[in-house]
Amino acid sequence: VNNFLKLITLLFWLFPADIDERITSINDYFTFSLYSNVCRSLFEKNKLQFAFLLCIRILLDSGVIDSHEWLFFLSGGSPLKELSNPAPTWLSNRSWNEILALEALPSFTEFVNVFPNNAEKCKQIFDSLEPHREELPSPWDQRLNKFQKMMILKCLRPDKVTNSMQDFLTDNMGERFIEPQTSDLSAMYKESSATVPLIFVLSTGTDPAADLYKFADKLKMGKRLMSISLGQGQGPVAEKMFHNAVETGNWVFFQNCHLAPSWMPKLEYIIERIPIDTVHRDFRIWLTSSPSPSFPVSILQNGSKMTIEPPRGIKANLMRAYDNQITEFLDFFNSENKKVNTFKWLIFSLCLFHGVCIERRKFGPLGFNIPYEFTDGDLRICVSQLYMFLHEYSDIPFKVLTYTAGHINYGGRVTDDWDRRCIMNILHDYYDMTVVNSSYQFDNDGIYHQLPEESEFNDYTSYIRSLPVNDDPSLFGLHANADISYAQSETYTCLTILLSLQPRTVGTEASSQEESIINLTNMLLKQIPQPFANISKIQEK
C-alpha cells in the first residue's frame, strides 16, 4: 500500500498538463511500474502469470474480452453433445472433447460443425513448430480475436499456450512486459527507509550476501554492515546488534530467518517498535529467508521484497551475468590489453555454458539424471579463475580451465557419473580454442555467436537484449519434442494458479456465476443416462 501511494504521488509531477496525454501517460507508466515493483517479489515461474492476469483485467474492464470466455479458458467445460473424433490419428480424444465444449460459447457455435472440413488445415497447425503464430482456417482467423484464438490453441497444442501468452502480452501491453526483469538492489534501496525492512526471499541454493556486500561497499557502507546468521542461541546477539544499529546508523543483515522460527515474534516486535523520531536515517535492516509459515506476515506486508533465484531462459541468465558479475572486470574488458578479445569471447562462452546448465534442469531426466542447483557463485569463481590464468600464462591453459570448471566448480555439485560426463561434454563445446573466434556460432541458426573483436561491454549487453525470450531445445543438445511435456505441465500449472486467483464475486456477478453453474449442472444431468424404469425385468434378462 505504501509503495502504491508513493507511486501515485510521483506520477502527478512527471507528466504533461494536457488531460488526455496525462491520463494515457499515467496509465502506461503506472501499469509498468506496478508490474516491475510486484515482479521484484515474485518467483520467475509466477511473473508471466502476473503480467498476463494484469493484461486480462485491463481488457475485461474495457470489454475486449468476455468474462465467460475467460473463465472457460481457465477451467474448460464439458461437451454439449457426443460426436466421433474426425481425426483420431493426430487429435487426442481429450483435445476433441475440449473443442466440442467450445460450442457452449456464442462465438464458437459453428466451429465444431465445420471442424471436420478444416481438419487438414488444423493438422498443419498441430504439426507446426510455432502453432501459436499459424493462421486459423477461414473465416475463423478473421472472425475470432487473439484471445479466442488462444482458446483454440489450448485445445490443439496446450504446450504452446505460454508462448501465445507472451505474444498476446507483446501485442496488448508491449514487449517490456515479457522481457526479463533484473534484480536491482539500488532500486530496492532507493524506495526504502529506516523503518522499512528489506527482505530477500530465497530459493534453493541462492545467497545474496556477496551482492549485498558489494552494494554496501559501493555506498561506502561496507564497514558499517553488521551481519549474523540466525539459528539456535543467536537471537539475543541479533537483538543487541539491531538496537545498536538503530542508534548509530549501521546496516544489519540477518540471514536465514527461516532457521529461527522461535525468534520471529521477537523480530516482529522490535521492527514494529523502531522509534520513528529517533532512528538514524542511515539505518537499514536486511533479512533473508526461504518461504516459511513462521516468517511474520506484518514484516512481509510492510517490507520491500526481492526474490533471489536464477532467472529463466538463456537471455535472462546472460543478462544477469553481465549486469552482476562481468561489470567487476569492466576496466579490463574495455582496455587495450592484447588478451582482452580472448577474455571477451571466453567470458561470453562461459556465461552461455552456465545458462545451458541451469536451463537443462527444466527438462527433468532428459537434462540431468539428478537436478542440480548451480548458482551464480559457480560462474563467479570460473570467471575469476579465467581472469587470473589469462594473466599468469602466455598461452590459454584450457586443460586447467576445463578441469577447474568441469570437475571442481560445477562438477563439485554433480553426484552422478553420467551427469558428470554430460557436463564435461557440454563444457567442451563452450570452453575450447575453437570458440576464440569472432565468427564462431554456438547453434545451427547462428542466433548465439561471438561478437567482433572491437565490441565493447555495451555491445554485448545490446546483443543479449536482442536474443529471443524462449530457447530452442537444440541449444541444449535436445530434440524439439523434449520441450513438449515440460511446456504442457507449465501451461496447466499456470492456468490452475490463474484460476485460483479469480475473485469470489458478489452481487449481480455472483448471481450470474451461479446461473452459469446451474446451467452447467443441468447440461451434465442431461448427459447422464436415465434410471431404469423396471429393475425386475432387467434382472430377468
Image: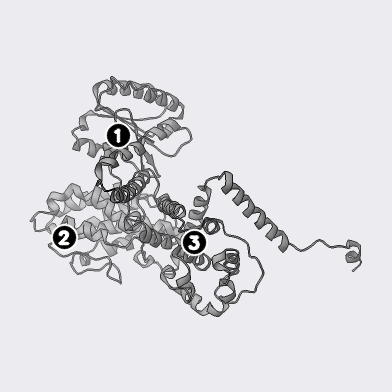
Vertical relation: 104 (above or below) 239: below
Residue 88, image quadrant:
bottom right
Tell me the element at label 1: loop
Question: On the rendered structure, is 194 left or right of 89?
Answer: left
- Label 1 sits on residue: 192
Quadrant of the image containing the C terminus: bottom right
- Label 3 sits on residue: 488
| Residue at image coords 46%, 72% | 141
- Residue type, mark 2 in image: Thr
- Label 2 sits on residue: 342
- Residue type, mark 1 in image: Ser
Question: On the rendered structure, is 107 left or right of 369?
Answer: right
Cα distance, mark 1 to mark 2? 41 Å
Sequence-earlier tag: 1 or 3: 1
Cα distance, mark 3 to mark 2? 41 Å
Tell me the element at label 3: helix
Residue 330 position within the rendered picture, expressed as x and y whole percent measured from the top left: 15, 50
- Residue type, mark 3 in image: Gln
